[in-house]
């Protein structure tokens, strides 16, 4: 209140000075000096730091880049050609959906004061319960309001930064049920999953009154909140939906590894905003997080390549890209807590363990289509446990934030506790939600016919595989195929699709006549 009163005084004095300038132009030097002094005084009053704000603006854009187009291309390249558009469409539509939910309710539920597991309503619609119309209400986000977790950046920016985390977490889940879930069912599932899983986990782990935060679990940038939450939820979806047609029998290699490499590269670049941005300041913690991210990612990518060569006899582009992403996931919970040695060791240890995690689906029989659980779920678990070993109080500057190798063995137990809670809640709630949708009239999985022709045609009426319009000369053909797929009717054969259009009478132009 005192700051607001002083600010109004400054505003009144500034107007008086500007009025002076109008009537006494010859004394402009004195006027400008007084204005400069006033601006410096106002800047000293505000908690907003321009350097921190600039870094978080950049980080927010980088994290959104991870999803669009990073994750969309990464997943789209790994999908079969008949399902590419449906795969990238899921990512894009989820980005739009979570954006709306986040500013309406989710930000408040995840990051405002409430209970130990969920936040309150003080920031619903970014206004909260206040209906007085007072623009200076404490329940209303303003130009100079801040969040306790980010006291030097404007709260609207902190809200948007955290929104990008919620977006990519929901989008990662799609990798497990790709190529077989109905689009409408996917949207319904993500809608309820976002509130019942993500908001609960984010508040428990990151909010100051969350029970995992208070217990001392370390998760710098989302090993639990983003990767375990999404990966384990994806595992539940893989089990409920069942495998794709031909899984384990038919060759389902990625249709375009170059797309996947481009997407993985964008993920790598964007991850600097993800990890270093989670310091919510332009400081040494952000610098160490960026350094640790690069070291762990490069180490993991190279180690994965060696492991794949020893296992299969040949290294692959898909392998080294997957290894780099695995390194990014593993270092995420520890990025701001470890030094260069810890980052190197985490990349070196994490890569073969995540490689093993990706192979589990072939032994267990579940179809984790694009390895959301194998990379993100397993990688998040491995990273969380290794954080309990390598967290370094020289980096954290806190005796309560150090791991086993630096004299605090209890931290490993706290890490395992957080992992079990997050994984258990995510799997249980996801399984229940998916079962309820499956038993509802809406249903969960597309028909066998629709899956055979591909979700691009059956769910969206478009395809990258064949340019229907140029072949048939008719938009109606695609609509016919899509409708036939949904109704279970007979689909046109490939020969019929690829047959040239019927000949048309030659056109005679006036000049030729």
Image (spheres, rainbow, N blue to C red):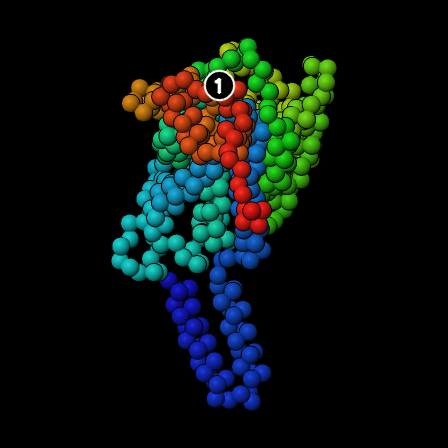
Foreground of the two, 26 or 173 = 173
Position above or below: 11 against 354: below
Task: Name the image quarter holding residue 192.
Answer: top left
Image quadrant of residue 330? top right
Q: Where is residue 251 in the image (x, y as percent from the top left)?
A: 58, 15
Indicate the quadrant where residue 337 lies. Answer: top right
Position of residue 30 relative to residue 206, above or below, is below
Where is residue 460 shown, x and y percent of the image? Answer: 43, 31
Q: In this view, does 12 lie above or below 382?
A: below
Residue 317 horizontal side relative to residue 231, left or right: right
Question: In the depicted view, which residue is nearer to us: 305 or 457?
Answer: 457
Is residue 409 something one can see in this rendering?
A: no
How many residues crowd around disc 1 within 10 Å: few (fewer than 14), some, or many (20 or more)? few
Where is residue 359 drawn, in percent x and y? 58, 15
- The residue lying at 59 percent from left, 41 percent from top is 270
All told, the count of numbered labels is 1
Between 140 and 437, the one lying in front of the other is 437
User: Which residue is painted at 58% across and 31% down in the image?
Assistant: 74
**Residue 219 vs residue 109: left or right?**
right
Identity of the residue drawn at 53% across and 87% down: 25
Identify the residue at image location x=61%, y=28%. 256
Q: Name the residue under label 1.
A: 493
Most extreme residue toward the front is: 513
Of residues 507 and 259, which is closer to you in this image?
Answer: 507
Instruction: Label 1, secondary structure: give it.
Output: loop
Q: Which quadrant would the N terminus be assigned to in this image?
A: bottom left
Quick check: can you spot residue 266? yes
């Amino acid at each position: 209140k005192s700051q607001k009163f002083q600010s109004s005084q400054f505003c009144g004095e500034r107007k008086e000075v500007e009025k002076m300038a109008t009537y006494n132009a010859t004394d402009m030097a004195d006027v400008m000096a007084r204005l400069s002094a006033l601006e410096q005084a106002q800047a000293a009053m505000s908690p907003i730091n321009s350097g921190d704000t600039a870094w978080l603006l950049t980080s927010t854009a980088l994290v959104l880049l991870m999803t669009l187009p990073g994750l969309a291309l990464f997943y789209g390249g790994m999908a079969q050609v008949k399902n590419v558009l449906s795969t990238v469409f899921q990512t894009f539509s989820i980005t739009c959906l979570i954006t709306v939910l986040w500013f309406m309710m989710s930000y408040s539920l995840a990051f405002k004061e409430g209970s130990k597991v969920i936040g309150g309503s003080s920031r619903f619609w970014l206004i909260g319960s206040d209906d007085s119309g007072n623009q200076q209400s404490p329940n209303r986000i303003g130009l100079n309001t801040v969040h306790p977790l980010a006291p030097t950046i404007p709260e609207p920016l902190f809200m948007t930064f955290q929104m990008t985390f919620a977006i990519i977490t929901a989008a990662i889940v799609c990798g497990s049920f790709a190529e077989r879930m109905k689009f409408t069912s996917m949207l319904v599932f993500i809608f309820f999953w976002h509130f019942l899983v993500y908001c609960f986990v984010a508040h428990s782990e990151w909010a100051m009154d969350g029970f995992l935060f208070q217990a001392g679990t370390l998760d710098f940038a989302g090993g639990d909140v983003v990767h375990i939450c999404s990966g384990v939820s994806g595992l539940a979806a893989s089990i409920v939906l069942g495998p794709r047609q031909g899984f384990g029998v038919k060759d389902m290699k990625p249709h375009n590894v170059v797309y996947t490499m481009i997407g993985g590269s964008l993920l790598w670049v964007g991850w600097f905003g993800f990890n270093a941005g989670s310091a919510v300041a332009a400081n040494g913690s952000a610098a160490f997080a960026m350094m640790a991210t690069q070291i762990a990612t490069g180490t993991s990518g190279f180690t994965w390549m060696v492991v794949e060569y020893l296992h299969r006899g040949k290294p692959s582009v898909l392998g080294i890209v997957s290894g780099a992403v695995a390194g990014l996931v593993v270092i995420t919970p520890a990025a701001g807590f470890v030094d260069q040695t810890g980052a190197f060791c985490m990349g070196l240890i994490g890569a073969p363990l995540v490689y093993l995690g990706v192979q589990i689906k072939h032994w267990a029989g579940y179809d984790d289509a694009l390895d959301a659980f194998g990379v993100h779920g397993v990688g998040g678990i491995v990273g969380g446990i290794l954080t309990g070993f390598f967290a370094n109080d020289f980096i954290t500057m806190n005796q309560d934030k150090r791991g086993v190798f630096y004299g605090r063995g209890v931290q490993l137990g706290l890490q395992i506790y957080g992992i079990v809670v997050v994984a258990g809640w995510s799997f249980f709630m996801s399984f229940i939600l998916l079962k309820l949708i499956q038993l509802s009239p809406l249903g969960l999985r597309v028909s066998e016919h629709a899956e055979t022709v591909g979700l691009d045609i059956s769910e969206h009426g478009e395809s990258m595989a064949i340019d229907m319009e140029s072949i048939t000369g008719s938009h109606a053909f695609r609509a016919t195929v899509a409708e036939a797929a949904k109704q279970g009717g007979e689909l046109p054969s490939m020969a019929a699709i690829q047959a040239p259009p019927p000949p048309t009478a030659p056109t005679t132009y006036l000049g030729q006549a």
